[in-house]
Image (spheres, rainbow, N blue to C red):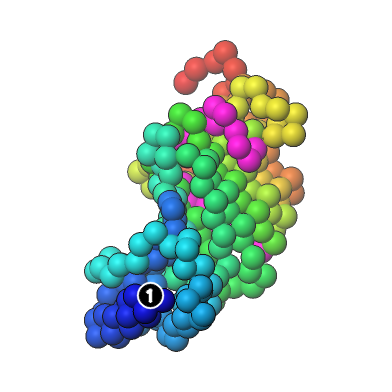
Amino acid sequence: MKKHITFILFLLIAVATSAQTLNVVTDNVTYAFPASKVGEMTYKDGTTLTIGGKVFTISDINKIYVDDSEVTDNEVAVTYNSTNATVTVAGNVAQYVTPTVSGAHVSIVQSNTDDVDGNEITYSLSGASSDGEFYMSGKYKCSIGLNGVSLTNKTPVYSGAALHIQNGKRVNVSVKKGTENTLIDCASPSDDLAQKAALYVKGHTEFKGKGTLKTGITVGSETIWSGMGATSATGGTEASITTYNSGSSW
C-alpha cells in the first residue's frame, strides 16, 4: 500500500511539472493523457485510480510512464502487426471507450451519446494482419480512418467481417490520401459470426478520402454492406474502391 501511495505522489509531481503525456498501459491498450488536461486524479482504497473520468483498477495496470508524445483529442489509434494489435486511446475519450484485444482481433465498445469536446470519436486503423479484425459497437456517430490497413479475418473472434461497425448512426469512413487499404472477410465463419460483407456497417455509411480501398468476400454476395445506405461526403469522394468475389483477383 505504501509503495502504491508513494508512486502515485511521484506521478502527480511529474505530470504537474512538465508539459508531457501521461500513459497508462493495460495489456495491449495505452490511454494517453496530455498533462495539461489530466485534471484531478483520484487514488481510492489502494484499488482504483481515476484519471480524466476513466477508472482504472490498479491490478489491471501493467505500466504508467510519462513521455513527450503528442495526443490527438478524440482519436483511438489501432495498429496491427501480424498476429498482434495495439490500441492507443486519447485521454479525453478514455472514459467512453472500452477496448478488448485478442491477438489481432480488436473489439471496442463506445458509450458516449453526444460529441466529446465538440467532436465525435475517430478510430484510425493502420498496419496489417492476415488474421485480424476490427469490431466496434456504439449508439453515437463516429469516424473510421483507413490509414493503410490490411486485414484478412481468418479466424474471427467477434464477427466474420474484417471491419464491422455495429452502430446504427452515421459512420464516416475516410480512406486516407496516399494509402492502400484491404479488407477480406472470413472464408468459413460459424453461423453466429457470419456477416454479409468484408466491411459491414449497421447504420449509414458516408465515404470520403483520396486513398484506395480494396474489399474482398469469400461468402455472401456484397463486399460492402451498409444497413441504412451509403453515400459520398459532401463534394464527392476521390477514393478508389475495388471489390472482388472469391476466385477472383485484383
Q: Secondary structure at mark 1?
A: helix
The x and y percentages for residue 62 are 39, 59
Q: Write the start and end of the magenta stretch as one range.
A: 140-159
Residue 3 visible within the image: yes
Residue 48 drawn in magenta: no
Q: Disc 1 marks which residue?
A: 4
Residue found 70% across the figure and 61% down from its top: 139
Residue found 32% across the figure and 80% down from its top: 6
Q: Is residue 13 above or below residue 175?
A: below
Identify which amino acid the numbered label 1 is placed on.
His
Closest to the observer, 249 or 42: 42
The quarter of the picture where residue 12 lies is bottom left
Closest to the observer, 172 or 13: 13
Residue 209 visible within the image: no
The x and y percentages for residue 33 are 39, 72
The x and y percentages for residue 60 are 48, 61
